[in-house]
Structures are given as C-alpha cells and as structure tokens.
Image (tube, helix red, strand yellow):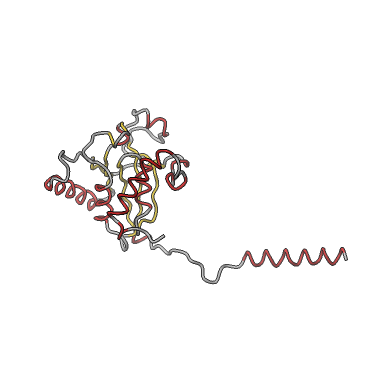
Amino acid sequence: MKKLRTSLFIFMSFTFLMACAQKPKNPKKQVINMKNTETITLGSGCFWCTEAIYQRLEGVVSVTSGYSGGHIENPTYEQVCDKNTGHAEVCQIVFDTTKISLDDILAVFWKTHDPTTPNQQGNDIGPQYRSAVFYHNEHQKQLAEKYIKDLDASGAWNKPIITEVTAFTKFYAAENYHQNYYNNNTNQGYCRYVIGPKLEKFEKVFKDKLKND
C-alpha cells in the first residue's frame, strides 16, 4: 500500500508539472508593435500624480517615474528633494501612436497642472516640481511650443505659461517604491487628498481617452 501511495504521488506530481508547463490555448496578451511607439518625458509637479494620470490613458504603454534636467549622475530622491541637483521630478511616457496622439498626450499635460507657477504645484514647492517638457524629437518641441503660444493667446490662464521646453538628455528612474505609487498606496494621505481629487477631474474631462480596465 505504501508503494502504491508513493507511485500515485509521483504520478500526480509529474502530471501537475506537465500541466503547468503547457501554455494556455488562448493567452490574453496585449501585442504592442514597438515601431509604433514614441517616448516623451514630462514634469508636471509630483511624479506620483503625473504617473497616475498617464497610466489611465488608452494607448499609453508604460509610465516610469524619475528625474531629468539636472547636473549630477544617478541622483537619489533625497538629493533631488534637497533642491541642489537641478533635476525635475518627471515621468517618462511610452505611448502607442496608433492609439493616442502626441497632441492628446500634451493636451492632458497642460490640462492637469498649473504651468504658470514657477517651481511649484499646489503645496509642493521647489525646482523639482517645475513644469517641463523634455522633448525627444523636433516634432515634440514644435508642438509643445505651439501649445504654449496658443494657450497664452487664448487667455486660458491669467498669467503666462512658463513651462520649460528642453531637449531630453538623461533620465534616471526613481527608486522602486516610487513606481506605480498611487495604485499601491491608494489610502495614503497624499494619494487620498491630492491625487484622488485630481484623478476625478481628469477622468471627467478625458473620459473618452481612458483605458477600459
């Protein structure tokens, strides 16, 4: 009987391992043609807010929080917060151009922060919170500059837009605990009282641009 149980256990273990090794017949995996993607790096205050907003847009492939525009290599969050590195908190956004346009990416950018306040977004104060577009190609530069010109002419704000439009050079990904921050910390105070309300406003304005899930 003991031998029978042992043999049965070995047989069941082998069957289980074989089943786990088999690929599902109809895997639900999003296929992305990276030839259709574009990357832009944006700073619009705290990168937790920027990340949460762009993660919800249909066509956005990835959003990585980090630092750009400074003068030291591999800055830490603490160094950036000390306001001596020159870096801005940014999100590097990769998007599928067949699903969302650069125009839409920039429309969301200017609609979801105040581009007229120098080194400040709400109660977040410091050069790391400045409004910035770090463009990766000439088209991004031209469109960003056109947006600024048109928005200033329209009187959308009662003060001129001071968004920095600078050629992208380097991006340093932020520490792991900053990535996917809002989704992982929804009940944290800043997420509940700052990011949450901002997301609600964003989702109402751009409801036709949101991911279905």
Classify the position of the C terminus by image quarter: bottom left
Q: Is residue 95 left or right of residue 107?
A: right
Report the residue that reaches farthest toward the right: 1
Could you say which quadrant of the image residue 81 lies in?
Answer: top left
Q: Is residue 44 left or right of residue 33?
A: left
Classify the position of the N terminus by image quarter: bottom right
Please state which of residues 38 and 46 is positioned toward the viewer in this rendering: 46
Q: Position of residue 188 (x, y in %)?
A: 45, 40
Q: Position of residue 204 (x, y in %)?
A: 30, 54
Q: Is residue 176 left or right of residue 127?
A: right
Q: Position of residue 86 (x, y in %)?
A: 31, 32
Q: Is residue 200 above or below residue 97?
A: above
Q: Position of residue 114 (x, y in %)?
A: 24, 41
**Residue beneath the point at 70% across and 67% down:** 15
**Residue beneath the point at 24% across and 55% down:** 103
Report the residue that reaches farthest toward the bottom: 25
Could you say which quadrant of the image residue 83 lies in?
Answer: top left
Please state which of residues 151 and 42 is positioned toward the viewer in this rendering: 151
Q: Is residue 147 above or below residue 96?
A: above
